[in-house]
Amino acid sequence: MQIAPRAQVPGYLVAGKTGTAQRVDPECGCYQGFSVSFAGFAPADDARFTVYVVIHDPEVDGGGGSITGPVFSRIMGYVLGRYGVAPTGGAPSRLPIEWR
């Protein structure tokens, strides 16, 4: 299983973490809406850049990977290309990504 496949950057290994959180409305002091995020770095096998994307109250359903993953991918892809970071093409880790 792959986490946040929409956050991939072609040619590079990416490492990251998704996030979904309820937001507190300061007027009522109650939970009102969500924020979703994706924080990641690349290339994962020789880190050069970190990008953190947050979207408050997204208008579509989904979590951090499905909503902010594509934004992360486009920004990180641009940054890696802009600064001439050669594609790494390294093999992903075979470590399990699910806890039981």
Image (tube, grey):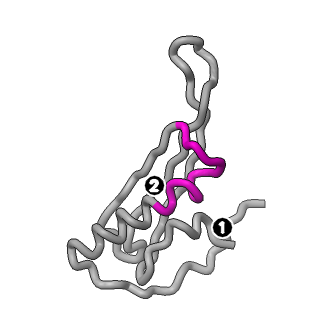
The disc label shown at residue 63, or none: none
Q: Say above or below: 41 vs 45.
A: above
In the image, the segment drawn in magenta is 57-70
List x then y, in percent, for residue 81: 27, 76
Residue at the extreme left of the image, as rendered: 83
Q: Residues within 10 Å of mark 1 (few under 14, many from 20)?
A: few
Left or right? Give the position of 75 relative to 99: left
Residue at the extreme front of the image, as rendered: 59
Quadrant containing the C terminus is bottom right
Front disc: 2 or 1: 2
Is disc 1 placed on a helix, strand or loop? loop
Q: Say above or below: 44 vs 61.
A: below
Q: Say above or below: 5 vs 20.
A: below
List x then y, in percent, for residue 7: 50, 66
List x then y, in percent, for residue 28: 59, 12
Mark 2 residue type: Ala
List x then y, in percent, for residue 42: 38, 69
Residue pictured at 45% horizontal, 86% vertical: 90
Q: Residues within 10 Å of mark 2 (few under 14, many from 20)?
A: many
Residue pictured at 63% horizontal, 75% vertical: 95
User: How far is mark 2 from mark 1, CA to CA?
Assistant: 17 Å
Left or right? Give the position of 50 relative to 37: left
Residue pictured at 40% horizontal, 77% vertical: 45
Which residue does the numbered mark 2 point to in the structure image?
Answer: 39
Quadrant location of residue 39? Answer: bottom left
Mark 1 residue type: Ile
Q: Say above or below: 13 vs 33.
A: below
Which residue does the numbered mark 1 point to in the structure image?
Answer: 97
Left or right? Give the position of 48 relative to 24: left
Quadrant containing the N terminus is bottom right
Quadrant location of residue 66? Answer: bottom right
The answer to which of marks 2 and 1 sits earlier in the sequence is 2
